[in-house]
Image: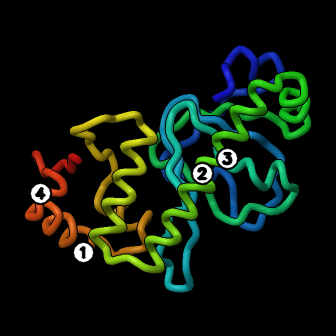
Amino acid sequence: MIPENILFDYGAIVENINASEVIISEKKQAYFYFQIKTGSVKMFNLNENGKEFVQGMFYQGESFGEPPLLGDFKYPATAAAVKPTELYKLPKQKLFKLLTENPDINLKITKALAKRLYYKATILKEISVHPPEHRILTLIDYLKIKNGAKEHYQVELTRQQIADLTGLRVETVIRAIKQLEQEKELKLIKHKVFR
């Protein structure tokens, strides 16, 4: 998203985060811009029974947690590393200076936020209206487009992560994927999902 040299020019540091370590906490104030150098991060909420609902998955080169930073409100979700992760961390005021002095980067971040809003609106519709198979295909098709894949896209998510992203139980995801394979909507090769 923001080139490394520009992040460093504005005072960013690199932090090493362990797998499962919390980076930002729900209901806490936002003070830093985070961008992934290596690894991956999930943003999630827990319901009263402790079930996780994943708001989004973020990977190398992507940023996360900007809306509370830009809108000056508290985080609506928690973010944690999925695996060992290196993060660029830039203080809020330095990010604002960077965005003011680099309108092309400002526009890039705005476009990324617009794509996330589109994803959230699409998934919300899926969760409230459609059956599991449709939800799963919508998620996979979104990821396929996001990653620029034309055909034979390999889904890098586990069954549990698909469940967390679609509001389903993992058992339901397993059954739905088998059903989708029978309907030739996707392929299973060595337990990996392809579309």
The relative height of residue 49 versus residue 160 in the rendered view (above or below) is below
Quarter of the picture containing the N terminus is top right
Task: Provide the residue designation for mark 3.
Answer: 113
Mark closer to the chain start, 3 or 4? 3
Task: Provide the residue designation for mark 1.
Answer: 171
Q: CA distance from mark 3 to mark 1?
A: 32 Å
The relative height of residue 24 versus residue 11 in the rendered view (above or below) is below
Task: Provide the residue designation for mark 2.
Answer: 116
Count all numbered tags in the image, as a single digit: 4
Q: CA distance from mark 3 to mark 2?
A: 5 Å
Would you call the spot at circle 4 few (<14 residues within 10 Å), some (14-19), or many (20 or more)?
A: few
Q: Could you say where residue 127 lies in the image, as x and y percent from the top left? A: 45, 74
Q: CB under 8 Å between callouts 4 and 1?
A: no
Going by the numbered disc 4, the residue's amino acid type is: Lys
Q: Residue at x 36, y 43 (%)?
A: 144
Q: Residue at x 67, y 47 (%)?
A: 113
Q: Could you say where residue 61 lies in the image, as x and y percent from the top left? A: 56, 31
Task: Provide the residue designation for mark 4.
Answer: 184
* Label 1 element class: helix
Q: CB under 8 Å between callouts 3 and 2?
A: yes
Going by the numbered disc 3, the residue's amino acid type is: Leu
The relative height of residue 162 versus residue 48 in the rendered view (above or below) is above
Going by the numbered disc 2, the residue's amino acid type is: Arg
